[in-house]
Image (cartoon, helix red, strand yellow):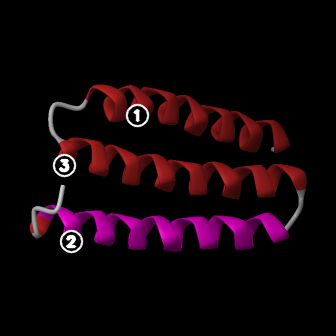
């Protein structure tokens, strides 16, 4: 079962690599913000699966922190875009 957890974590990192291309080449800044938010969500999922693979529960706290602050970052970027400060 540990190999499945590791395979899923590596798969999530591969998805993040594809999203990094979208961040770099997004046609609009809104597309880039959405891709960045999706990358941080994928990173949190990858950390959760790595925590299951490694048997370390402290990584679950890191994933929760990462997911929470990535959500707040998306809200901040949305507010900047709404007010046209960029």
Q: Position of residue 14 (x, y in %)?
A: 55, 29
Q: Which residue bears the numbered disc 2?
A: 79
In this view, the mark in front (1 or 3): 3
Task: Please tell me which residue is depicted at 82% across the width and 49% down the height of the picture.
Answer: 53
Q: Is residue 15 left or right of residue 79?
A: right
Q: CA distance from mark 1 to mark 2?
A: 22 Å
Residue at label 3? 30
Q: Is residue 28 left or right of residue 75?
A: left
| Residue on which the image places disc 1 | 19
Name the element at disc 2.
helix
How packed mark 1 is, by other alpha carbons closer than 10 Å (few <14, some 14-19, many 20 or more), is: many
The disc placed on residue 8 is none
| Disc 2: CA contacts within 10 A as few (<14), some (14-19) or many (>=20) | few
Marks 1 and 2: which is nearer the front? 2
Of 46 and 72, nearer the camera is 72
> Which quarter of the picture shows residue 18?
top left
Quarter holding residue 72: bottom left
Q: Residue at x 64, y 48 (%)?
A: 46
Q: Is residue 72 left or right of residue 75?
A: right
Verify CB contact (< 8 Å) between mark 2 and mark 3. no
Q: Nearer the viewer, residue 85 or 36?
A: 85
Identify the secondary structure beneath mark 1: helix
Q: At x 73% / y 44%, what residue is drawn? A: 5
| Magenta-tinted stretch | 58-81
Task: State the SS at label 3.
Answer: helix
Q: Residue furthest front?
A: 85
Seen at 59% across and 57% down, the residue is: 44
Local crowd at mark 3 within 10 Å, few (<14), some, or many (≥20)? some
Give the image location of residue 48, x and y in percent: 68, 58
- Which badge, 1 or 3, is on the more N-terminal residue? 1
User: Was residue 20 drawn as part of the magenta stretch in this picture?
Assistant: no
Q: Earlier in the sequence, mark 1 or mark 2?
A: 1
């Amino acid at each position: 079962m540990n190999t499945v957890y590791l395979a899923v974590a590596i798969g999530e990192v591969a998805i993040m690599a594809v999203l990094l291309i979208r961040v770099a080449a997004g046609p609009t800044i809104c597309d880039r913000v959405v891709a960045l938010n999706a990358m941080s969500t994928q990173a949190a999922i990858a950390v959760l699966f790595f925590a299951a693979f490694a048997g370390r529960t402290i990584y679950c706290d890191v994933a929760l922190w990462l997911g929470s602050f990535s959500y707040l970052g998306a809200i901040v970027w949305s507010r900047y875009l709404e007010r046209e400060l960029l």
